Amino acid sequence: MALRNDRAVQAAREIELQETDDGYTLVGGPDEAVTEQHDTDRIPEVDVDQEMLSDTGEDPESWLMYGGSYEQHRATPADVITPENVANLELEYELSVGTGSSMEGTPIVVPGDPPVMYQTNGPNHMKAIDPREGEILWSYTYAVPMGVELCCDDNNRGAAVHGDTVYMTTLDSGVVALDRYTGEERWYTSTADHEEGYSATWAPVVHDGTIYTGSAGGEYGVLGFIAAIDAESGEIQWQTDTLLEDEWVGASREHGCGTSWMTPTIDEEAGVLYTAVANPGPDFDGTVRPGPNFPTCGTISLDLESGEFQWGFQSSPHDVWDYDAVAPRVLIRDVETDDGSMDMVVGSDKTGWVYMMDAESGDLHERSEEICQHINMWEMIPHISEDERVAFVPGAPGGNDWQPPSYNPETGLVYVIHQNYPQDLYWRYEEYSEGNPYWGGGLDDPASEFPDEWNGAITAFAAVDPTTGERVWREWIESEDDHYMWGGSLSTATGLVFNGTQNGTFVAYDGETGDRLWEYEFDVPISASPMSWYDPGEGKQYVAVQVGGSGWLRQGPRGDTLAVFSMED
Ligand SMILES: O=C(O)c1cc(C(=O)O)c2c(n1)C(=O)C(=O)c1cc(C(=O)O)[nH]c1-2
């Protein structure tokens, strides 16, 4: 959704981003892509093959994809840092990597001597880094065409790797492949026309030589899709619309959105992917799209080879609150439940709940206890007239917006952040016009009057038991001093959970109890999701997080660093 506050957006050093009434437009930048090589000889030859990719979740020395594994657990098996010693965790360095733009990415790390980190930030910069020394080995800037429209900042959330190539989505709805030893461009593939309002902000994922990627532009009346691209040639293998033709009334499907703008989850055993599907379009005026608008604001499963639709589950049918389902789906195997053992897909959604689905059928097994407050939303829409404003909680940032949950196999818990943030909503009839915002109403941010029942906390950080839906603990994060969360979490094999806040506090929690065990203060917000790896050459476990104010609710200064913490064996 569009950012609508009065804070000026700082122009990026190389690419200028201008704030408009409805979001952002790119207005300046390089005419062609730029690669700068600094010390590329230092990158060791390592063939990142399918076995390495499949095993990365079990390998403490690597973090080879956005979610830490195909199941998107964001859990490192590295076990040097523990609840007992985390108080001694120290910052090793802060490296300036950013360009005064969005810093929502999670880096990846390819093991080796030295290991090599691939880091991205908005708008479409990638760097290869020696993470031992904190030195940049090459850097690459994609030439984003002018006029790309973005609802929520110039985000790029990370890279994917396969063989000797690294991949990044581009803001103009493409994927670019780079030689991972030199940073030179190999190919570029466009998946949709940015002039129609399409964009791309997430990290792609590669499996069996195929790149899986989605679509953004859900505030511009696009038609969402998932695409599979050949990792060698860049050729599109299949492209499946998220909206099923027989489920939509009349022409409403054509601009019905249902984008899918976070990294899909790969189920290697079942040969399918799971991904969240965002809001229907127009966002707030449901009168022009009767019916449930299946499968928007939901989860879908597609066959990896053919792209064929398998199942869909909606957490907000016929949505009129911009309750996209967004955050990466978490796949948990062999969960023991009252109904027997099942592979489970966990979706933490903007609605303010967490949904546990049977991976095979998509049937809802359990909905969690509420994570944030729920005031007004289900009752109000039929009762308001055009342009009248009504406060609702959770507002359109959720619940759980894009921030990836983590799952800790040790505690058996899923860690989620939900926004408990009231907004004013109004609706009105709008004509579709190509490439322009298509909301059917809008939001005032924050709400003009806060509902009496609102408890004043903007974020809830919570642990959920996926077997029962029980909310095992919850920390309310108070709104004072912009003290809310806007990044996803990292779990460790020793039971820790890391996450950062918008006032720059990086926190390690006891995953069992939710107690804060360690804190480090930055002077700018954290809006990214941390990651971790073990480096046997140094005998150290590292934790890395990008630091900088980013995204829709950005309030603090930009910031532009990669912060790396370490602890010796
Ligand atoms: O529907 C879309 O295509 C789309 C894309 C994005 C994005 O790409 O960042 C966001 C949203 N929607 C959105 O609804 C939203 O709340 C949001 C927050 C953010 C952010 O980075 O903070 N992006 C987006």
Image (cartoon, grey):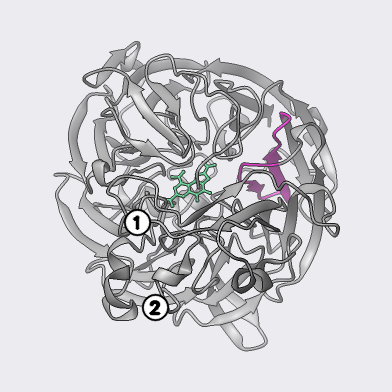
Q: Position of residue 186 (x, y in %)?
A: 18, 32
Q: Position of residue 256 (x, y in %)?
A: 35, 64
Q: Position of residue 178 (x, y in %)?
A: 25, 31
The residue labelled by disc 2 is: 311
Any magenta on residue 497? yes
Tell me the number on the disc at residue 46.
none
Q: Which residues are magenta?
A: 485-504
- The answer to whether residue 85 is seen in the rendering is no
Image-based side of 529 in relation to 286, left or right: right
- Dot 1: within a 10 Å radius of its alpha carbon, few (fewer than 14), some, or many (20 or more) residues? few
For mark 1, give the secondary structure.
Answer: loop
Q: Position of residue 1 (x, y in %)?
A: 50, 48
Q: Nearer the viewer, mark 2 or mark 1?
A: 1
Check disc 1 and give the amino acid type: Glu
Any magenta on residue 242? no
173 or 383, which is in the foreground? 383
The residue labelled by disc 1 is: 431
Quadrant of the frame with the C terminus = top right
Image-based side of 463 in relation to 327, left or right: right
- Dot 2: within a 10 Å radius of its alpha carbon, few (fewer than 14), some, or many (20 or more) residues? some
